[in-house]
Structures are given as C-alpha cells and as structure tokens.
Amino acid sequence: MDQLIQQLINGLSVGATYALIALGYTMVYGILRLINFAHGEVYMVGAVSSYYLAEWSMGWTHSLWVSLPIVVVGSMVTCAILGFLIEFLAYRPLRDRPRLVVLISAIGVSLLLQNLAQFQAIFGPTPKRFPELIQSTPVLYNAAHTIVLTNLDILSLGLSLGLMVIMTWVVLGTKTGLALRAVSFRFDISMLMGINTGKIISFTFMFGSALAAVAGTIDAIRYDVRPLMGLMPGLKAFVAAVLGGIGSIPGAVVGGLLMGLSETLVKGYLPSAYTGYADAVAFVVLIVILLVRPTGLFGRVAPEKV
Amino acid sequence: MKRIAFIVLLVLAFGLTPMACKQKSGQRDNSTGDILIGEYGSMTGPTATFGQSSHEGLMLAIEQINAEGGVLGRKIKIISEDDQSKADEAVNAVQKLINRDGVVAIIGEVASKRSLAAGSVCQKYKIPMLSPASTNPEVTKTGDYIFRTCFTDDFQGKVNGQFALRRGWKNVAILTDVNNDYSKGLAHFFREVYGKSGNIVADESYREGDKDFKAQLTKIKGTNPDAVFLPGYYTDVGLILRQARVLGLNVPFFGGDGWDSPDTLTLGDVVNGCFYSNHYSPEDPRPEVQAFLKAYQAKYNKTPDAMATLGYDAARVMADAIKRAGKADPKAIRDALAQTRDFAGASGIITIDAERNAKKPAVILEIRDGKTHLVDTILDTGT
C-alpha cells in the first residue's frame, strides 16, 4: 500500500512538468490550429538559461530566497522572449500559407535550437549537473520512511496546478482572455471586431513559453541539463495535450498528470522485462483512449467552421 | 550558360572527391616520415570524459615514446577524430582516418557500441584496431584485425558477482540499462556467478536517456536488498544515486568501470560507501603504475582515471607492436599485436590471447569522501 502511494507521488511529480509543457501546446493549438513542434526546445532553453542564471546568481549571493526567484523569473522572461521571436520570425511570415508549411517551419526551429545548444560556446553536448541551489530533500514522510514527499515534488505539483488556475482565470476572466477566445473562435471575424490578432498571438506564445521555462527549471534542478532534453518530454507533453483534448486547459493538465502516472505505474508494476519499454506502453494507452474518444478526455466536438 | 557550367563543375567536384581520396590512400608511402596512427573517441557528448581521459593518457604515452627517439627511428604522429559519442560518427571518423589520412593502425574507442560500429570498417580495410577500453565480448569477434588491451564484460560481471559473495551480501537487487549492451552483459554474467548462492531480489531495468528512476527505485526499496548492482554509465549513476537517497534507499550501490569518472567522485554524500570494479588503482605500488602516475600528474596536474591509464597502455602496446613488426605496415602490425606477451602496462600485465583479448586482474574500489580506495583484487572468478 505504501509503495502504491509512493508510486503515485512519483508519477504525479513527473506528470506535473508534462502538464506545464502541455499547457503551451494546447494554448497555441487552440488559437492557431498549429502544433508548435519547437515547444520542447523552449523547455530545454528554459533549463539551460536557469542553469546559467543559477551559476551567475550563486556567484554573489548565498540566499536561496534571492537566487531562486532570479532563476525562475529570469528563465521565464528568457523563454517568453524566445517564444515571441519564434512566432514573429518563423510563423508570422507564413500565416497565409497552408498549415503544413508552418509545421515544417516549426520542425526547422526545433532542429535549429537543438543544434545551437550543442555548440560548446552556448552550452555544449555534455550533460551538466545543476549548481547546488536546492537539493531534492524529503519534507513530508511517514515514520517508516516508506512514503516520501520531496520539496521538488511539492514545487512541481503546486506550480502546475497553480498556473493552470491562473491561466483559466486569464482566459475566462480578463479582457485579453476574451479577445483570445474570440480569435480562437473566428480568426478573421475577430480582426473585423477590432481585435489586434497579432498581439494576441504573440501573447499566447510568450505565456506558453514562460510555462515551459518553469518546467525546464524544475527538471534542471532535479535531474540535469542536456541539449537534447526537450525531445522526449516535448513529445510526451504533446501526447498529453492530445489526450486531454487539445485546446482545453484542464485537459492539458489532466493529460500531463495521466502520462506521468501511467509511465511510472508501468515501470513500478509490470514485470521488469517491460520497464525499459514504459514509454511505449504509455503511447499505446494514448492510442486506445483516442480510439474510444477521438477528441480526447476534455475535448469538445468542434463542427468544421465554414 | 553560366549555370550549366556551374552545375558541371559541381558534378565534377562531387564525382571526383571519392576518387581523389582513394588515390591518396593507395599512394601513401608508409616507409618514410612520421608513422601515422589514428585515434577516434568521444571528445564531446554524453560520455565525453571517457574520450577525453583516454586521449590524455594516449598523448602522454606518445610524447614519452617520441622523446625516447620514437620507434624504428621514426616519430609517431597521432591523428584524432571526435565521434561526439555517436556510433555513426565513429564510422565516419574511422573512414576519414583510413581514406583521407592513410593511417597504419587505429586506437579507439572506449564505448563498445562505437567500437563495434567502427571495428567492422577497420576489418574491411584490414587496418589493425586496438580498443583501449571496450569491454563487450563481441568487439574483438568482429574480425582478426580487432584487439583490446582491457578485460571483457563477462569477466567484469563475474568479478562483481564474486565480490558481492565475498562481501556477504545475501540479497542483491539489479538495475540494468536495457538499451546498452555493456550494461546487459555485466548483469548477465553477474547473475551467473552471484545467482548460484546469493539471492537476486529484484531485477529492474531502465533505458538510456531516462532521467526519472524513482519508480524502479521505489520497487527495489520494497524488497529490502543488502546492496544494488548498477552496471551503468556515470551519467546515469549520478541521477540514480541522488534519487535513491531521497527515497531513503541507503544501501551500497556497486557497478563496473562505467562508473569511473571524475563526475562520480564529485557526487558527494550519496556515493559514499559505494563500490565499482576497475582496471587499475592509483594505490597499486608496482613501478609501472607509480611512474605513470608521476608523469601524468606532471603533465595534466591531476590523478589519472582508468580510461587515461588504458589509453596510455593501448598506445604503448601499439608502439611496442610496431617496433616488433619492424615496419609500419598494417598486416605486420596486426601479427605483432597478436604476439603481445607479458607486457608490463600501468593497468596490469597484458597478454593478448587467441581471441585478441587482454587477460589481467580487476580491482574493486570503494568511494569515500571524493576518493577511491583499493579494497579487493580479483583475477579468479571461481567459474
């Protein structure tokens, strides 16, 4: 029983970062019907920038309460700028082209960022351990030490749920959110209604990228930083977004957490011969769910707008 | 018209390149000038410290040999290629060394996966390849031009099994990288020896590139093992140990030479009291070891790890073979390499057997406070 609870904690903790990345996929898809394949690399840039920010800030301060905000906010700002630039340079000029063209452009951006990060001058191909800013330490545990909840588990879960709430509020409760929904509903008509669609799209990209930066920072702290680290989480988060119903904000979070859970439970409970193939099993789960519910768990059936 | 001329030029340029290369390698005269030896390794990438260490050891050996007048009255020149820790790049690197540079012999790689990929190229061109540290048994089975100056996975896996028994561990859990032949090989031969009288309580696996191991570690913790056998590479070892300690899995972990890296020693508390089998220990009093230590420290200002030592030995075995061959010819060097007997290297007394493998003992090191300590030497694995 204790072991099951521990596995659930492990799974939710892994899933939380998938959820944060999935939120970015889902927002961009909701507004542009575009799968931003460079999103996994934004997550990687978030990890890399937090690595450098941590190194820099720890050079002159020993206080965690000074360093950590600098690292988190700094990497969010970096990625927001990156997200803006990606949209402005690689997607906006192709706005009127077929969607496939933009998709290819997205893959191009993804490869570009992966390879840039492998330059020694920028980051280098070797994995690097995160500076000792915060250690993953148990904060809540039972007497037998069989159930352990670490500070980073709480941080990642708290951040992903908190940011989901904030996002829902932004989309449903603010004027920008209203415009965002309008653009998502009818792109051309919303322009006629006096909405600055360019601005709204830029905002969406910046917001989504900042969330990916948070995920990147968490994973950088608890694992390490590598130039190709965006590949798998990016793919899994995309799957999570589809699983939850692409375009849906709670769907992305639930999808992300489900991905993390299924992956962990496969590793924890299937015979060990299969644990190496946990990812494959997770993707099979996706196929099954999509066969049963093609719109995903929270997706609405959207009639083709004519 | 201009465009057509351009296209014709382009076609000619590409069409002629392979021909030019072929001619160059065919015409290269190996009887005068420096003796060219190729080296390929992972200077960058996930296992970069392996390649860099091995390269440093190798360059030190070549420097010493050239300072003593070289071999056959000629100097040895090393041409290095970086394979970025990738198997396909290793193949490219070896092809470049053979076709473009016309080397007479090749030293590399550390990782078995890359040695296997590049070894078949060397075999095809009949250029002797000497791997300093690839321990997978398959490597030298590629062909009669492929050698190694280290022990093999079967031996190392058995050594670890023997060690676990000697230590009195009744219950041991195993955590293997199923994507890595090295890891699988070690685990297989460990089971063979340890499984006879010990109890394997969990046999878990992960895949190269995984970063979260908590699911497997939680499962292992539930079986209360006395120790965990972890035959992985140092990048994974660091991540796994940190996560294990957070979960409260505080038993010793032990593994093979894939652990050997400065990165492992700087892990701090989580790695204290862990063990790994290795090719050599800096505490070994033999004069070859101590002389090498001193020279290495003078040149690089640090203690050599096993990869540096193996790189050093590989270069010296190669030079010795060229000397005995009497000429810088790939076939003659191959035959001389096969004849290597009782060569006193820094990593042990090296004899190349009929399978082109080196026979020598393994040492078991304990990690404590950022340093390794020699706790055991095992040659006979009892099988």
Image (tube, rainbow, N blue to C red):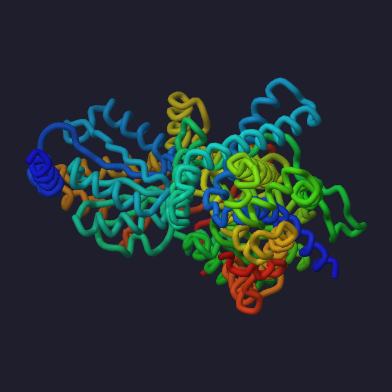
Instruction: Tell which of A109 and B222 is nearer to you.
Output: A109
Pick the quarter of the image with the N terminus of chain B.
top left
Q: Is residue B217 visible?
A: no
Residue A133 found in image quarter: top right
Instruction: Look at 68% across and 32% down and name the residue there.
Output: A74
Instruction: Tell which of B122 and A205 is nearer to you.
Output: A205
Q: Position of residue B215 (x, y in %)?
A: 71, 62
| Residue B109 vertical position relative to residue B315 in the rendered view, above or below | below
Q: Is residue B7 visible?
A: yes
Q: Position of residue A58 (x, y in %)?
A: 70, 26
Q: Position of residue A30 (x, y in %)?
A: 63, 56
Instruction: Look at 48% across and 39% down and name the residue there.
Output: A89
Q: Position of residue B258 (x, y in %)?
A: 52, 51
| Residue B348 vertical position relative to residue B291 in the rendered view, above or below | below
Farthest residue in the front direction?
A: A192
Residue A256 found in image quarter: bottom right
| Numbered label tally | 0
Farthest residue in the top direction?
A: A60
Farthest residue in the right direction?
A: A143
* Residue A283 relative to residue A218: left or right: left
Instruction: Tell which of A156 and B20 is nearer to you.
Output: A156
Instruction: Look at 69% across and 37% down and name the residue there.
Output: B369
Instruction: Look at 61% across and 38% down and name the residue there.
Output: A79
Instruction: Tell which of B322 and B324 is nearer to you.
Output: B322
| Residue B39 vertical position relative to residue A144 in the rendered view, above or below | above
